Amino acid sequence: MTDLRNYISTHSLGSPLQAAAGEAILALSDAAAQIATLIREPDSSADFAAAQGSANADGDTQKALDVICDEIVASALAAAGVSTYLSEEREEPVSMDKDGLVIVACDPLDGSSNIDTNLSIGTIFSLLPAATGPLQPGRNQLASGFFVYGPQTTLLLTMGEGVHAFQMDASGVFHLLDWAVSIPAQTSEFAINAANARFWHAPAAAYVADCIAGAEGSRGRDFNMRWLGSLVADSWRIFRRGGVFLYPGDRRAGYSEGRLRLIYEAAPVAFLVEQAGGRATDGKNAIMDIVPEFLHQRVPFMFGSDTEMEEIIRHHS
Ligand code: AHG
Ligand code: MN
Ligand code: MN
């Protein structure tokens, strides 16, 4: 069975830039193996969920595990010769190796609200060429992926030649899964935080109302809803069985552009989604085409099964 190291060695031969990307991905997998082990330690959740009394640049209260994961990832990347580290948990870019060829943008711990609920959480990463600086459109990504720390510790990865899935064994080795990753084009399952319904703008509200109207409504079939509060967990399910995920902008103060951050949440997931035959949009533009104006920029984020995404885009046009 192929493991991640074998996979990287055969997928990053083309250039020094690709070799540097491969090194960064292996460093991230070592960090993920450390994080997965840490989370499984007894008594970890009580400590790890503790608020640190600090907020990150986007205003989120930092949990202990947010900060610990950020430090584990940062030290792994520094040892891998990465040029610059962009993190949800760091206000500014962190310069590492001045001769480094790759920028790594990262959400070190996605799903922080789930740390002490024993639900799946994860780490999201995006690799960009260092030559062009931190504010690049997702289209420039060299690779992206996310780890899920759940009943299984898994990795979904793209280096621009499709999407591959891996599962970590007890020793921390990631093994390639026999899964031709492709998001089913059709779905009857949507993911949205329905508690925010009264704040939604018309397009999202109309789309969700049609789903809820089910067989008696204009869609002529019943839908199901899932919302896990961890982007990585909702995403893994959508890659596995199809679905659509919506975190639109809404009327709440601070949520006009939704909640998810472009550089280290939406763009890396959008790269995987497009590589797996799905669509990822802010309602009007492909996520991958949006040029960030600042590091912690939020973006309305809707992605998933191609045919169902057409319906969502229709509502937004
Ligand atoms: P993070 O824990 O890195 O801040 O990300 C949480 C994100 C995403 O994982 C999830 O889909 C979304 O926030 C949940 O938002 P609500 O709590 O508003 O539902
Ligand atoms: Mn996140
Ligand atoms: Mn996070």
Image (cartoon, rainbow, N blue to C red):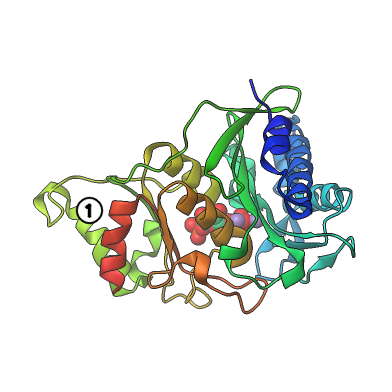
Relative to residue 197, is residue 245 depicted above or below? above
Q: Is residue 168 left or right of residue 288?
A: right
Q: Which residue has dot 1 on it?
A: 212
Q: Is residue 118 left or right of residue 26?
A: left
Residue drawn at the location 50% of the way across and 41% of the way down = 236
| Amino acid type at mark 1 | Ile
Q: Quadrant of residue 250?
A: bottom left
**Label 1 Cα crowd, 10 Å radius (few <14 / some 14-19 / many 20+):** some
Quadrant holding the N terminus: top right
Q: Is residue 157 left or right of residue 13?
A: left
**Ligand 2's quadrant:** bottom right
**Place of residue 303 in the rendered image (x, y in percent of width and height, measured from the top left):** 42, 56
**Place of residue 191 in the rendered image (x, y in percent of width and height, measured from the top left):** 39, 51
Q: Is residue 154 left or right of residue 202?
A: right
Residue drawn at the location 86% of the way across and 50% of the way down = 75
**Place of residue 253 in the rendered image (x, y in percent of width and height, measured from the top left):** 50, 78
Viewer-proximal residue, 58 or 108? 108
Viewer-proximal residue, 63 or 231? 231
Residue drawn at the location 47% of the way across and 37% of the way down = 181
Q: Quadrant of residue 183?
A: top left
Viewer-proximal residue, 113 or 120? 120
